[in-house]
Image (cartoon, rainbow, N blue to C red):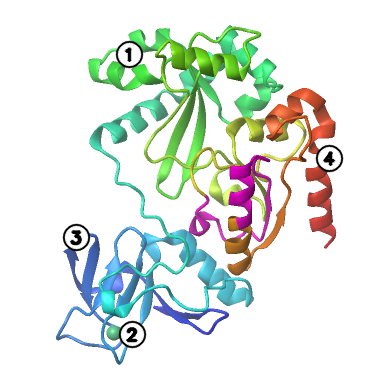
Amino acid sequence: MQMVTTLHGKHIALVSQYELRDPRTNGDYIRAYCHIHGSDHQRSLSIHRSSGWGHCFNATCNAVVLVSEWNPSVAARLLHSAETGNSFRFPPSFPFAPERLPLALQPVLLHAPQPAAKWQQEEQKTLLALEDQLHTDLFSSRRAYAYLMERGVPVQVAQQTGVGYLAANRVSQCTAAEQRSLVRRWAARMLFPLFSPYGRGYIGRSLWQWRPGMNEQVHKTLLERENGPRRWIKTNPAGWFCAPFEQIASSIILVEGAFDRLALLTAGFDPTEVVALAGTALQIDWLPPQVKTIVLALDGDEGGQEASRRLADQLGQEGFSVKVCPPPQDRWGKDWNERWRRIGSASVLPLRKTCSALRSA
Ligand SMILES: [Zn+2]
């Protein structure tokens, strides 16, 4: 066990699951005898299994605990901050009410993941096993190649980030019937690898009936009118389209879409510094401990702006240094990919300025 004190003077006991005394499962919670105040009468320590956060109900103890193995990224950030004496700030008060116990203690923004259904686990495994074929198909598919070209992204850039394509004829090549049925909904999709603390996943963009020259809006309308497949689907777990968490840079640019990330990488930004949310909310506890600075470059539409304001607030409270850099409000498009396609390298100048200002700060 290691005690950590936050900037607001809160004490948190980082414990290992092996320290828990005679733990019992109780729904989403683990109850254990509290080894912090040393009681054997009641299992007064209640810990939320998915988030790792817990609390001792004993009024004289009131310990706040985090089980390191169950939430390694937050545990790492707590330790890192304790050692360096900076930047892990909790809100001034913990938003849990002792009278409403047992609630999970969620001082940051902890979203317990939806447990994956059996078929989702199988789907994830099947896709990961097809990884090499997905990469081969990306290079051999004319449609994928043309689609990337029209998005302004060379196939090599996509390939370097692990993007793949599932050619329609792959489905019939799967020998097991179960595999075929799992893979079918991913056919004719461009697949983007996703990372999360809960494992790897994919998000897939349908290129069903897409033809060169067809713009996004026309394709969207076609998919809807023809009762075609959904434009985007995800595995469970999903996650962010980014570098593996341990490789992420200390200063990152956060964008919304997978193609926004590809556009920025094509423009010369480093794969370790651009993170695309790809439809998964920003969860602060996912950010690896080395991340210190965040440039919020979400879409320029109303939804993106509103999300930027909210996130800038939350991230600031958590001790991150934050800059907001939305795409400029002009006629060249609301996201980085659209702007990249239309005005090329001029589109990323605002981001370059923001990033270099941060570096010299
Ligand atoms: Zn206790």
The relative height of residue 161 versus residue 91 in the rendered view (above or below) is above
* Count of numbered tags: 4
Query: Is the C-beta separation of discs 2 and 1 under 8 Å?
Result: no
* Distance of label 3 from label 4 (alpha carbons): 51 Å
Query: Is the C-beta separation of discs 2 and 4 under 8 Å?
Result: no
**The residue under label 1 is which amino acid type?**
Cys
Which residue is at a point 55% across and 10% down the rendered structure image? 210
State the residue position of label 4.
349
The relative height of residue 161 versus residue 3 in the rendered view (above or below) is above
* Distance of label 2 from label 1 (alpha carbons): 55 Å
**The residue under label 3 is which amino acid type?**
Gly
Which residue is at a point 17% across and 64% down the rendered structure image? 26
State the extent of the magenta-drawn residues as a range: 282-309
**In the drawing, what numbered circle is on residue 27?**
3
* Distance of label 3 from label 2 (alpha carbons): 22 Å
Asked if ligand 1 lies within 8 A of label 2, the reply is: yes
Disc on the earlier residue, 2 or 1? 2
State the residue position of label 2.
62
Left/right of residue 342 with respect to residue 96 in the rendered view: right
Ligand 1 sits in which quadrant?
bottom left
**The residue under label 4 is which amino acid type?**
Leu
Disc on the earlier residue, 2 or 4? 2
Between circles 3 and 1, the one closer to the viewer is 3
* Distance of label 3 from label 1 (alpha carbons): 39 Å
**In the drawing, what numbered circle is on residue 174?**
1
**The residue under label 2 is which amino acid type?**
Asn
Element type at marker 3? loop
Relative depth, front residue between 168 and 279? 279
The relative height of residue 29 versus residue 349 in the rendered view (above or below) is below
Element type at marker 4? helix
